[in-house]
Amino acid sequence: MPKKNKNVKKFRLFSAVLATVCIILVGDAVAPTAAIGNSQYIWWILMLVAFFVPYGLISAELGSQYPSDGGMYTWIEKALGEKWASRVAWYYWINFPLWVASLADLVTTYLLQMLGFEMTWPIILAIQLGYILLVTILGMLRISQSAWVSNLGAIVKFIFMAGLGGLGIYVLVTQGSANPVESWTDLLPMVGADGGFDFTGLGFVSLIIFNMLGFEVVSTFSDDMQNPKKEIPKAIVLGGILIAIFYLLPSFGIGVAVPLEELQTNSGLLDSYNSLLTTIGLSAGAIKAITVVVGGMFIYTLIANISSWTFGVNSVTAFAAQDGAFPKSWVKRNKNGVPYVVSIWTGVVAAVISIAGVLIAEFVSEDLTNLFWTFFSLSLVTLLMSYLPMFVAFYKLHKRGPQTKTGYWISGGKVKIFLYAFVPMLLLIVALFFTLFPEFNLEMFDYNWPLIAGACLAVVIGEIMVRNVTVTYGEWNKYTRSGKKNRTLSSGKKQKRTRKATK
């Protein structure tokens, strides 16, 4: 485990709450979520109860009972071994450059919408690479050093999301909604237009869950906090309340502003502001000025989001690199204790993806707007895959009992703990399946094959990388209990490896 830097500025509860909001409250996911339609409100209630609450409390327990920069990697390693921890680290990391590339494309989309004129592909590419370079540099700072970025990002999100929700409420009362509720069945999940059962609605679960992920990142800030055992649970609870409110407000505003069939997943937020401001009778000049301000605020949140996530993702990846799942150079940290090599490679991979995307859009397909959804969808799938073992790890670690008396602990019997662990995991499995296979027909492969192929490729590469991890935690734990000083541990080709009993 890396040594703590005693000179690092401490990260206070206020900043931790705002960082939690900045990490989890992602503006780029608001329009895709609003595309669910009027049933999104019931979906939100269901997912808040069945996923958000147990996931947040589990993160609080693991984060305070096992505080570490390694976050989710450390928990899974202790429960399931290094191979499973390394698998998780791979999916957790590869989602990140995909997400960065999708946001880089979103930045150019919003600039085009704000400025109102076309850009040549070299300019578009330069803007995207500039965004990637900026977030890569910010990723080389500790969260306590860049706290002002996440703090301001959270405040900015509050402003433009609350503004969109407030406009939506006013227009609903005075003018009506673009997506009125015709009957109570419009609010029900998985009910089709004909009133029959619609399995495809389960594909929306992944979008709601994506909007709730990130609590475990807060636990990687433990070394920067004054009292992480108390502050991590508080940050999660307070941040969670704010997150729920400020997701529903803009989703409601978009639903009032734009007909569902016309909603664009990449530009829906600004489209909604334009529509609502036009409806209340503002002049074209005022609408243009507000659009530019809101667009600028939104782009800033895309920078703040990544800078808040980076340290957590990089730390998990660096811990996996120590066990051989990634190149050994990825372990290297700068004077602030940040694994900077990981950040550099994340930026490089994101840049390659962006360059390929822009060139393909320019010389192969003219539909540039699909790039955001393509990168975002694959990022979503790999991210959800990384969370599956976390709930199994919680179940095993919880049975071992509290590791510290002052840490947060979920009370309750075996049935409650079982439900806390496996209901969210089941929802993740359902979300993954229906994201990859949204319909039960062969025509689905015509449009979803790139996502399915990308997910399969991610699994194959992950398994190849995990083969480098030759010692599992279960084997090592057995060895340390045996009292022997040396033991031959085998894998695949019967490689011999001994390790000091330091775990």
Image (cartoon, rainbow, N blue to C red):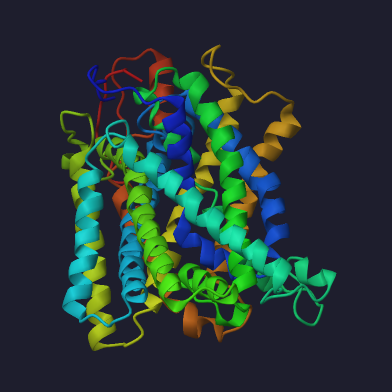
Q: Nearer the viewer, residue 25 or 140?
A: 25
Q: Quadrant of residue 144?
A: top left
For the point 67% across and 55% down, which residue is it? 44
The vertical placement of 413 against 141, above or below, is above
Split into 4 quadrants, where in the image is the C terminus?
top left
Q: Where 171 sits versus 306, above or below?
A: below
Judging depth in this view, the residue of 449 and 306 nearest the camera is 306
Q: Position of residue 163 (x, y in %)?
A: 54, 57
Q: Which image quadrant: the N terminus?
A: top left
- The image quarter in which residue 450 lies: bottom left
Total tally of numbered discs in the picture: 0
Does residue 327 appear in the picture of this structure?
no
Q: Residue at x 20, y 82 (%)?
A: 120
Q: Residue at x 61, y 58 (%)?
A: 166
Q: Position of residue 102 (x, y in %)?
A: 35, 65
Tell me where residue 317 appears, x and y as whole percent.
31, 42
Asked whether, in this view, residue 291 is left or right of residue 360, the answer is right
The answer to whether residue 277 shows anywhere in this view is: yes
Q: What x and y, as percent, mark residue 53?
A: 64, 40
Q: Does 258 sit left or right of 460 as displayed?
A: right
